[in-house]
Amino acid sequence: QKGETVRIAFMDPLSGPFANVGQNQLKSWQFVADRLSGKNPAGVKFEVVGFDNKGSPQETLNTLKAAIDQGFRYVVQGNGSGAGLALEDAVEKYNERNPGKEMVYLNYAAVDPAMTNEKCSFWHFRLDADTSMKMEALTSFMKDQPQIKKVYILGQNYSHGQQVSKFFKEDIHRKRPDIQIVGDDLHPIGQVKDFSPYVAKIKQSGADALLTGNWGQDLTLLVKAMNDAGLKIPMYTYYAGVTGTPTALAAGGESQVYVVAYGHANHTGDLAQIANDFHKKFNDDYYTYATYNGINLLGAAMAKAHSTDPVKVAHAMEGLTVKSFAGDVTMRASDHQLQQTMYITKWQKARKGEYSVENTGFTFVPIKQMDPYVSSTPTSCQMKRPAG
Amino acid sequence: MDLPGAVPRPVPEAAGRQAYYSFRPLNVGRWVVWSGYALLLLAAPFVFTSSLALTMLSQMGVAIIVCLSYNMLLGQGGMLSFGHAVYSGMGSFLAIHTLNLVSKGQLPLPVSLIPIVGGIASALFAVLFGYVTTKKAATPFAMITLGIGELVWASSLMFPEFFGGEGGISGNRVAGGHPFGITFGPQIQLYFLIAVYTFVCTAGMFAFTRTPLGRMLNAVRDNPERVEFVGYDTQKVRYISFIIAAFFAGIGGGLAALNFEIVTSEVVSGYRSGAYLLFTFLGGATFFFGPIIGGVLMVLAFVLLSEFTKAWLLYLGLIFLFMVMYAPGGIASLIMMNVRVASFGRLKELWVSYLALACTAVVTLLGAATMIEMVYHLQLNAALGPKLTFLGVGLNARGADSWFGAVFVMATGIGLFEVSRRHFVRQWGEIHEFIAREMKRREAL
Amino acid sequence: MTLALELKDLRKSFGRTEIIRGCSLQVQAGERVAVIGPNGAGKSTLFNLISGRFPPTSGQVLLNGQRIEGKKPFEINRLGLSRSFQITNIFPKLSVFENLRCGVLWSLGYKYTFLKFLADLQDANERAEQLMERIRLHKKRDVLAANLTYAEQRALEVGITIAGGANVILLDEPTAGMSREETRRFIDLIKEVTVGKTLLTVEHDMGVVFGLADKIAVVVYGEIITYDTPERVRANQKVQEAYLGSSVADEQAGAH
Amino acid sequence: MEFFTISLLNGISYGLLLFMLSSGLTLIFSMMGVLNFAHASFYMLGAYFAYSVSQLIGFFPALVVAPLLVGLIGALFEKYALRRVHKYGHVAELLITFGLSFIVLEVVQLIWGTSSVDYRVPALLSGPLFTLYGTQFPMYRGFMMLIALLMLVAIWLLLTRTRIGLVIQAALTHPETVEALGHNVPRVFMLVFGGGTALAGLAGVIGGNAFVTEPGMAATVGSVIFVVVVVGGMGSLAGAFVASLAIGIIQTFGVGIDASLAGAAQSVGWGITPDTFGYPLWKLKISQIAPIMPYMLLVLILIFRPKGLLGTREG
Amino acid sequence: MLQVADLHAYYGKSHVLHGVEFDVGEGEIVALLGRNGSGRSTTAKAVMGMVESTGHVHWKGQDIVGRKPYEIAHLGLGYVPENRDIFPKLTVHQNLMLGQKSAKQKGRWSFDDMYAMFPRLKERQHTEAGVLSGGEQQMLTLCRTLMGDPDLIIIDEPTEGLAPKIVELVGEYLKTLKTRGVSVLLIEQKLTIAMAISDRALVMGHGSIVFHGTPETLRKDAYIRKEWLEV
Ligand SMILES: Nc1ncnc2c1ncn2[C@@H]1O[C@H](COP(=O)(O)OP(=O)(O)OP(=O)(O)O)[C@@H](O)[C@H]1O
Ligand SMILES: Nc1ncnc2c1ncn2[C@@H]1O[C@H](COP(=O)(O)OP(=O)(O)OP(=O)(O)O)[C@@H](O)[C@H]1O
Ligand SMILES: CC(C)C[C@H](N)C(=O)O
Ligand SMILES: [Mg+2]
Ligand SMILES: [Mg+2]
């Protein structure tokens, strides 16, 4: 086991519209794998190889077959729940039909709660926090903001946006029943060029806070439109940190944007070192901190299992606790969802010594840190474990 | 195989004329071609055995069916659709829902028949949408398909209840009874199911070109106005053909659903529709078998080319550009031109030229590709150092020698290619003059 | 004798201009009628109205006693009226044989079927084959229509028109662009293939007109100013003024 | 009233933006009959060029230089590629522009990277133009509207004061005859295509910083601009203008309407519950589908008035 | 004015003209006769630079072989194509406008002259040319070319599809062109009119000139007529 090389197949878009994110994340995995090779408890080396799934669920199944042919037993994926769900389902079926050749799937960013609830699988482990957990964290923060009285929800009309709206309403009703929901709008994803009508509507509703699960252009255009119209209310978001978005946000000027995430741009210690070296090497930001937890988790599990065999490692990962960049994290056995610290960060001009995100001169500063239990949500998963 | 739109054949002997238009199932040429096709479908999985190859072969079968069905519209009916994925995709969704009913034991239907359900479902959608779509031809037709395509795609994300949201709908094809121990679990079993469907559908669509409606569809493409004056309602011709095309597309979609066991909204996307259009054209819309080539290429391009190089979209774009400019009839037309030369017994003179053309083209491509790869490397992986390997050769993307080498290789390639091209053009022209003379001579007989 | 075609005060305006100003005409079954008149008089328009290409503004068209005005071209065709076009209008990418077969199919009842092979339709194939011989294109059976010479395309145009077996045939300048000699042969061909049918034809070649027609209708400015036998039309003063002019026409007419 | 005024303003300015995006397409489509699928790619190129050029010599020079560069590329593309496939018909022309859009996308990513670039509105034009009921109307938006109107005037002059339009239309059917009458047809085609793409480039210069300059920007405007051209009526500049405004206004007001079929049914006494068949469809609010209303409009227009709003011909 | 010598023309590989030789003087009407397919239209196209050709075409002293059609047109040659290539989507008036080489050009002919010649065209001024009757289209092409103010006009079968009376009118009109100093190369099928108005006649057969003389000599030359004109 010591000195063995564990090969990991990375499957995310490396070409096409989401290539920027995928390329960055591939580099993040490779960088961290390189760094922690040999230096993990199991003493194994890690090698991460990229497969281009073009963001498409069907192509993901092709790349999975390609990876299987090339002898990979571990796959990581995160960019998009569509591909993630397809992969989870395919790995499950493949393992069932091909005993002895099992694959393990580490999910570092696909956040559809279904993956650890009704569609959960023994072979799937999520390193990110799902939409419902982030919402728990976000609402826990918002409930302590007395100035928030009227919230407007705007989202992309697909599962993620619909879930954000649903979870917010449930959680906030529980935590701050006095908060009024003055608007709950969904728009088709990627179709809106001009958000000013929405801004006008938000303004008319008298909202004092905006909640959105939007990402990519749908987020940056929304922020721009709000700036343009001079509507200065805080925005609570999920995905302001994804590659490209900070640059676009910065181009639009200062705005009140809050992000919920399991990490932020200004960590100290090992992770800060990684981020700095990464930036030096690639002139790009390291923001997929889950890669760090992922490699650590694998290393620890392999040490515990005394093997790199996916079945044994999967069993070993269940309930395993490792040290992360922000305290301990635990892979919950019941649904394979990592329990970890959550942060609320705010987008603002970087002061001296703070990390300038995408060289924009802006940064995400943590304004609230929450222990893992805060964001923990129950699961409906009925895990079917193979004997072993 | 005598295909619609093929080069005019010489007039047959007077004695043979009577038999000429009567159906001859034992027409030797046709028999050979069709059995070759069947054999190819059968033998493929024994040649390419990896699991990736198997799933690719399966996808090729599906792509062949869908591209052929698309060509019923484009090639045979002159209807440029930007929304064909709506029909293959709807077939997929209905098929996967049906599969899930079968899994739950609520529907006693053998899994092997589910693609037909997909086909029927698509046809029903076409009855609905097609009615408005086929009211018009030409550009208005194209634009309506674009609009409907966008609408369906947008809805596919909005209605998770039917389309399954981001995760789509998944199913398990190991369901229902298992006659003869066929579970369709192993990919190879499914492949053979797809192969059978592919063969039958190809035959079916070919047969369609030989029916009165199929012929009137060609006539509508060529001159819709005149069609009205020989007693046909052009709208109806388009409408019925549209439904039939959707039926086959739906079968393809149903097979895809069985193959992937998951259907997500991407199957109805405009991007998909665009791919069908591009590859049908690339394969060759003017010949019946063109889309078969197109379907195979489509899977190769999406699955293999992208693994081979990050620049695949650039290559794809360039290939299209050059194909449209220099071979607008697609690959099929290139093949048929050579078949024509061969039928006059002059093909063998050309092989030296072809070899020269191929070699010099490869050299040119090598040079160009090396440069493209170096540029991509600089852009994407500069941080990993300027070194890269391309086709086993170590290159330095910042080194003058690598660039010089690449430019040199490409320039040499271009030069030699031009020389052999000129030679070839002369030869080709000469042969065609010969063929023209020969045809005149035979006609005069 | 029965009336094959009857027009009752037919009118057509495009925008504000009235192009056809009340035409009435009665054509007996089996008659050959030539329609002549100055350029832009409305001859082609009249054909367009009869064949359903445009709906008339007012008036009636009766085919074998049945009113057909305002019907779609394919409906009129199915009732037994077929036409050719002044500007060649064929299926360029289909072979000669296929062009003719397209003309034959509906009348033999094959309609929109996709459950039968064309090759098995003995009757349709034989009909198309015979027709091809009659219009003397059998040597070009499998040549694409686009590759035919002009005269051959004109012949095909007429071939498609008569293929469906319609008994009222409208030909719009069938010989336009042909040489004298070709014209002569072509007229013989038309006579031959339309035996027993009702024929309306537009022509400028007076030789053709006087050689072919049983009756002549002269259209001037959207009105039928005379409808009579060739001899009497030729003698008609008004026709000479409006249309024939002086010497040229006589000479042309005499050329045959 | 307040909401109405602001929405109307938003609708008009969005409509003008749409017109800016599609004016070049209208020009090319109406004159040459080419469905230029790479139009949005030229728009993207305009934005990227403007980004680079404005870093060197400032925004306002870039406003001139970038469209010219884009127009040059367009003209070269016409000369060396599009012209060759003209004889194969519209499908081939369309496909070659399709191919081009792939190439442009990749090349843009090669040169400027896969992320968005920091292309900002110049300081001179940022900030509000005026404030209405407490809502600011940004100066840059005003600038955008102005440019759109200038484009309209420019094309209109081109079409009415020159015979380029006539030459092109005539050349579509009988290019040789037009040449024999003494017109340099190839050059006119090149000018029109170059001009159309330059307009796309100009839209890119303006749109690039108003929105986001990133490789995905072409895809996001890709098909809606076709809607404008078709709804307006193929070949009609005025139609495209009217269609842009109509779409802008409809869409903007659509966002403000929260009515749904379920609500309508309720008001006539039908109870729609989550168990009703097709509930997701019933509960869909107009505001949710506002951004895809252009496509509905497209389909409806083509069915009921295939000539488009002000068009004179079908196809 | 126009001198053609040893002119060869090709459609791709097929060689259609084999050394055509003739000339047209100032203010002359020359008829080019011949059977279908003899190469008359091709000769016209070759002069206009519309087909691939070699040899010599001298126009006002310049050799114009290999020039582009629009350059040749600018030198003062006008061409009326045989198959009524009117621009169907443009109005009658717009069609005429395109005949002018530039918007400002002032020539011998004005729109009014044209409308006076064929009043039908004036009536239909603002109609799309595509819906004109066949004969009206023929008139339009003739006028369109005249608008370009050519010094020599090559007319390919102008009387095709025209009513007999109009045919006569066209003949008259060609004669008045001549009086205004315009030369005419008239390609015709109908001997009568060609013979009536032309100064000289050429007969073409299989891609070369087989007869050259006055209409009278041609009328008398039964052999040429039988061999090359009638069938
Ligand atoms: N769709 C239309 N819109 C407007 N005017 C039209 C239309 N169709 C025909 N016309 C006009 O109607 C008149 C008659 O045209 P028509 O084609 O019937 O003449 P014709 O008698 O066939 O002449 P020719 O012998 O020259 O072919 C012409 O002046 C023509 O311009
Ligand atoms: N585009 C073409 N491609 C190939 N061959 C052609 C083409 N146009 C004409 N030809 C051939 O060139 C020869 C001369 O044709 P041309 O048109 O010059 O004859 P013409 O004397 O004008 O006869 P017509 O009475 O038919 O107008 C003919 O044999 C014809 O088949
Ligand atoms: C691109 C990412 C921001 C997408 C996100 N991970 C999702 O699940 O939707
Ligand atoms: Mg007519
Ligand atoms: Mg000719």
Image: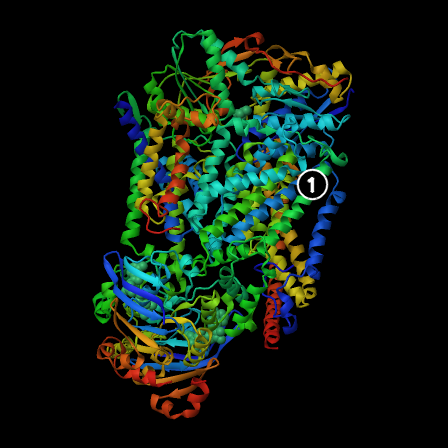
Which image quarter holds the N terminus of chain B?
Answer: bottom right
Q: Residue C39: where, in percent of width, then height? A: 29, 70
Residue A17 seen in the figure: yes
Residue D106 seen in the figure: no
- Quadrant of the rendered image holding ligand 3: top right
On screen, residue E8 versus residue E84, left or right, reads: right
Residue at x-position 65% and y-position 13%? A334
What colour scheme was applied to this rendering of the protein?
rainbow
- Quadrant in the picture for residue A118: top right
Q: Which residue is mark 1?
A: B193
Q: Amino acid type of disc 1?
A: Leu
Residue at x-position 58% and y-position 44%? B248
Relative depth, front residue between A119 and B20: B20
On screen, residue E179 versus residue B177, left or right, reads: left
Query: Label 1 CB, ligand 3: below 8 Å?
Result: no
Q: On screen, D261 above or below E196?
A: above
On screen, residue B80 versus residue D210, left or right, reads: right
Q: On screen, A12 above or below B369?
A: above
Disc 1 chain ID: B
Q: On screen, C100 above or below A114?
A: below
Q: Secondary structure at mark 1?
A: helix
Q: On screen, A87 above or below D165?
A: above
Q: Residue E40: where, in percent of width, then height? A: 42, 77
Which image quarter holds the C terminus of chain B?
Answer: bottom right
Q: Residue E91: where, in percent of width, then height? A: 29, 59
